[in-house]
Amino acid sequence: MHTKQKQLLALIDSDPNVGSYSLRTIADKIGVPDKPQIVKYHLQQLEKAGLIILNLTTGTIKPVKKGFVKSTVNTVFSLPVVGSANCGPATIFAEQNIQQYLKVSSSMLPYNKKDLYALIADGNSMNLAEVEKNKTIESGDFVLVDSGYKSYKNGDIVVAVIDGLATIKRYRFDKENERIVLEAHSTEKYLPIFIHEEDDFQLSGKVVGIIKS
């Protein structure tokens, strides 16, 4: 996201009166004085991304909060996409920055929760892992993750962050050796990942759905 768009979002979130300001005043507030057209452009881009409600004629500039948004046709969910995760070795950095919002009909979601976010799967080590009926995780798919899930059990498909790198794997706790094992489920052979107690490791949610790319 462009720096000016981030500044505009911060201003809109913090100032409920921003819609009453002129574009020139908003330009001053984000450090681009005398450039109202730049402000207009970035506001329009934020509207296209589904991040704000914009009507310059009526002076409406409001944030779209994460969650359900009523439309005249259906109920849609603005789902934050926070990056990519490997379906293979953990090699993609888990930078928790919202890259975009995915607008999804509520009927496509497994359940409606504020803790849902999306990742883009990269790789094929989970291409036999069936999350929903007849839906497996393939490279490029949007993977829906419940970040509020905490009661992990054997067989759960999870997003794990290892030394700052994200991967999607099947979770298993090895009681005999008292360690977590992350396993692939693929048409190809991948070695499991064994988590040592000294590793920089965390579980960032359970995979609960897939939107095919």
Image (tube, rainbow, N blue to C red):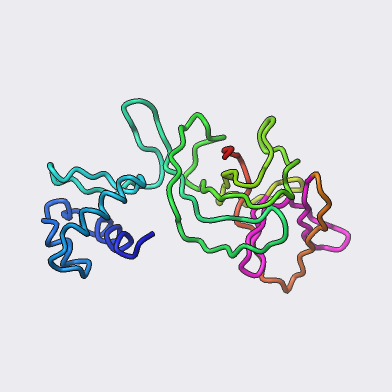
- The span picked out in magenta is 158-186
Give the vertical position of 92 relative to 102 (above or below). below
Tell me which corner region of the image, top left, top right, bottom left or bottom right, holds residue 201.
bottom right
Residue 90 painted magenta: no
Give the vertical position of 180 relative to 155 (above or below). below
The residue sitting at the top extreme is: 73
Task: Please state which of residues 46 and 18 is positioned toward the viewer in this rendering.
Answer: 46
- State the image coordinates of residue 194 (x, y, percent, origin top left): 79, 63
The residue sitting at the bottom extreme is: 198
- State the image coordinates of residue 25 (x, y, percent, origin top left): 12, 62
Residue beneath the point at 16% across and 46% down:
56
- State the image coordinates of residue 91 (x, y, percent, origin top left): 66, 64
Q: Quarter of the image containing the N terminus? A: bottom left
Residue 165 painted magenta: yes
Residue beneath the point at 73% across and 43% down:
127
Q: How many marks overall?
A: 0
Residue beneath the point at 47% across and 60% down:
97
Task: Please state which of residues 2 and 114 is positioned toward the viewer in this rendering.
Answer: 2
Residue beneath the point at 67% across and 51% down:
158
Give the vertical position of 41 relative to 208 (above or below). below
- State the image coordinates of residue 50 (x, y, percent, origin top left): 35, 44
Q: Is residue 79 left or right of residue 212?
A: left
